[in-house]
Amino acid sequence: MKKIAIIFLCFGLYGCGSKSDGLAKLKELCEKDAGVTIYKTVEADGYYDAYTNCHHCWQELLKSEYQFVEFCDEIDRNPLAYAIPESGCYRVLKEKRAGNSCHVDIDKKLNKKSVEPYVSFVKDHCIVVEKIEKPEAPAKFAIKEDIFDKSKDTFFMRFEFIMEDYNDVLSRQVDYTYYASNERLPSYSCHHVIDGFKRYSIDEFTQKTINPNN
């Protein structure tokens, strides 16, 4: 009777063996090279974000000491969803409100917000957008994603945040995720299997490496 109950429990949890095997492999991967490594920090007023297509990339400027962020996109984007829809490279800047330099659409979006930091920001500042031929920031942020060991219901993914100065890697963050579509909790990452594992957001990661000039 106990054996039947255990089998029923395993089916109720969508397979005890497959889940434990997947988590064991996840822990092995995480112990191999997951985590944050800062090789070098630099001082700069901004950086080139090679990952974003700037859906709301100016948000970083409101939450940090950075003065600008650069991005490039090879294709046009939906003007209903993107304030900067045309293809090309751009520098998005935080500047004192003056004249007609503010980006009209972004300014409208920011002025609709009634919470901080938006309220304080729009009093004296606004977002300015400049088209540039190519990125000029001293550091570049990128994300690498790799899917492997894919089966019908499961796969693993390796995420890597990278900050570099075009010659050397300044910092990196590695994390792994185990996806199981037949589990109640469909994904598990390193912080699920390693106590105290620290995973930074993109904003936190960039600020660990690029120190804004004061």
Image: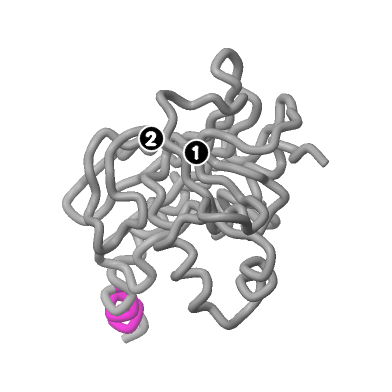
Q: Quadrant of the C terminus?
A: top right
- Which label's residue is closer to the chain start, 2 or 1? 2
Q: Specify the amino acid type for callout 1.
A: Arg
The residue under the point 69% across, 64% down is 124
Check the image and report above or below for 201 versus 10.
Answer: above
Residue 21 percent across, percent down from the top left: 39, 51
User: What crowding class fits label 1: few (fewer than 14 Cα within 10 Å), some (14-19), or many (20 or more)?
Assistant: many
Q: Which residue is mark 1?
A: 91
Q: Specify the amino acid type for callout 2.
A: Cys
Check the image and report above or below for 65 versus 5.
Answer: above
The residue under the point 44% across, 30% down is 132
Give the magenta-colored segment's residue range.
Answer: 3-10
Q: Which residue is mark 2?
A: 72
Reply yes or no: does residue 86 show up in magenta: no
Badge 2 marks a residue whose secondary structure is strand
Can residue 28 be seen from the camera position used here? no
Q: CA distance from mark 2 to mark 1?
A: 9 Å
The residue under the point 46% across, 55% down is 103
Horizontal side, residue 145 vs residue 191: left or right: left
Residue 102 percent across, percent down from the top left: 51, 55
Check the image and report above or below for 38 versus 1.
Answer: above
Disc 2 vs disc 1: which is toward the camera? Answer: 1
Can residue 90 be seen from the camera position used here? yes
Residue 11 percent across, percent down from the top left: 26, 74
Whether the residues at callouts 2 and 1 have beta carbons within 8 Å, the answer is no
Check the image and report above or below for 72 versus 118.
Answer: above
Reply yes or no: does residue 5 show up in magenta: yes
Q: Nearer the viewer, residue 61 or 35?
A: 61
